[in-house]
Amino acid sequence: MAAIGKGRNRLLREIMADQPWDDPEAAPPVAFYQRALSGRAPALTPADEQRLLLSPAARLHHAQARDALRRIAAHRLARAGVETEARRLAAATEADTFELRSADFTLAGQRDEEGADPEWLLLLRLSDRICAALDGLPLRLLDEEGLVWLEGWPDASGTLGGVWTEHGTPMARLARMGVRIEGG
């Protein structure tokens, strides 16, 4: 199923790459997207999302807003002195659960055998220090090769969950490399 989604995403990127450039002044400003992405304003409406599909200038402003929020989050995390990396697991195993700990976050995984295709459920638990440093900004958990494992806003208890969508298991990947948190 993941391969179909990736093919659809590639097709969408190709279509968007061929769109004629529109007037950047007509697109919402970077600050508009920063407020929406930081959670300090209402989420994007369906009309805003459609504009992102149809307007290269809007996508540029959206990307600039994401980059700015990532820089802000990186600065806040560095200033707070939190640990944003966790080293790899000792070895890949066939277990149905794993837990990778750092001083400021824990990544847990559990294999879910329900349904036709077993999947891995991931849960990232953040320390109060990371939550305070991010102060409502989104985050990403990614590995040393840049693969994004989780992305979004932690809930009020400092957790973020998701499903592993890549080939292989997260434990096999963690046997080869570590993960890190950055602003999302």
Image (cartoon, grey):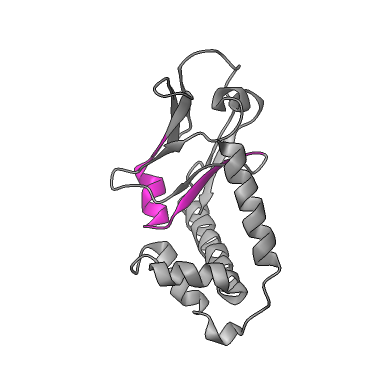
> Where is residue 104 shown, x and y percent of the image?
44, 38
What residue sits 51% from the left and 47% below the top? 140
> Where is residue 114 shown, x and y percent of the image?
39, 22
> Where is residue 7 shown, x and y percent of the image?
64, 46
Magenta span of residues: 123-144
Q: Is residue 48 left or right of residue 66?
A: left
Quarter where residue 146 is shown: top right
- Residue 84's place in the image compared with 135, above or below, is above
- Residue 107's place in the image compared with 94, above or below, is below
Q: How many marks?
A: 0
Quarter where residue 39 is shown: bottom left
Q: Is residue 11 left or right of residue 127?
A: right
Q: In which quarter of the image is the N terminus?
A: top right
What residue sits 49% from the left and 52% below the top? 77
Q: Nearer the viewer, residue 40 or 48?
A: 48
Q: In this view, does 49 lie to the left or right of 178?
A: left
> Where is residue 50 shown, x and y percent of the image?
48, 69
**Residue 35 visible in the current orientation:** no
Q: Which of 83 and 54 is in front in this view?
A: 54
What residue sits 49% from the left and 79% below the top? 28
**Residue 51 visible in the current orientation:** yes
